[in-house]
Amino acid sequence: MSSPEHLAHGTLIRYLELCDVPPPPDATGRLEDLFTPDAVWEGVGPLYAAKFGRTTGARAIAEMVAAHLPPNPHFRANVHLLHPGTTSVKGDEVRGRWLMQQLSRYASGAAELVVARLEVDFRIEGDTARIRHFRTERVFTTSLPTAEAAAR
């Protein structure tokens, strides 16, 4: 059996892969299944609290995230890069903190690099970790060249 930290990390990686556009070929599962039924997903800090707010419940979270993913044309391409983080275990709970880079090209042609701080609480259920509370805070952003400018 994997350690609670390893299970939590694996769940976070699957979440980020399912949010990539296009997702990796081996990304499987449903976003909803990665969350506890009473999970909370929220944007925190001055930039993300207003943009994302707070969503409660696995189904509502999956629907909120899916609104940005195909077939919705929000992203042309989107990839998440997770930096090493720290985790702590208390009983059947794991809390982790990571920095995540997100490189996005939007349907408009605009592109940006975002760095966000993730603080995520997981509940361990047997050999599965489910997200109980997901918090994201943008700490850096910059525009990237458009596809047309990059091709020149």
Image (cartoon, helix red, strand yellow):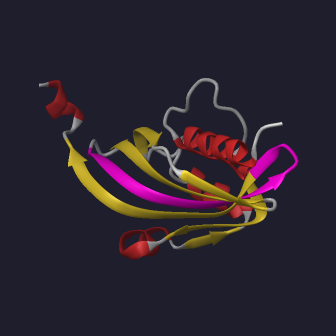
Q: Quadrant of the N terminus?
A: top right
Please, is residue 108 above or below residue 137 in the view? above
Q: Which residue is more in the foreground, 33 or 134?
A: 134
The answer to whether residue 134 of the structure is visible from this angle is yes
Q: Is residue 72 above or below residue 136?
A: above
**What residue is drawn where x is 30% and y is 46%?**
108
- Secondary structure mostly seen in magenta is strand
Residue at image position (66%, 55%) is: 62
Position of 23 relative to 30 (above/below): above
Which of the 4 image quadrants contains residue 38?
bottom right
Q: 39 or 66, which lies in front?
A: 39
Drawn side of residue 93 relative to residue 81, left or right: right
Numbered-mark total: 0
Residue shown at the point (61%, 45%) measured from the top left? 15
Q: Is residue 92 magenta?
A: no
Q: x and y percent of residue 23 in the render? A: 55, 32
Can you name the residue that lies furthest to the right here?
Answer: 126
- Compared to residue 105, the image places residue 90 above or below, namely below
Residue found 60% across the figure and 60% down from its top = 120
Q: Is residue 79 left or right of residue 59?
A: left
Write down the region rendered in magenta: 110-129
Q: Is residue 118 magenta?
A: yes
Q: Quadrant of residue 105?
A: top left
> Looking at the picture, how far across and down is residue 6, in whole percent?
69, 42
Q: Is residue 52 left or right of residue 31?
A: left
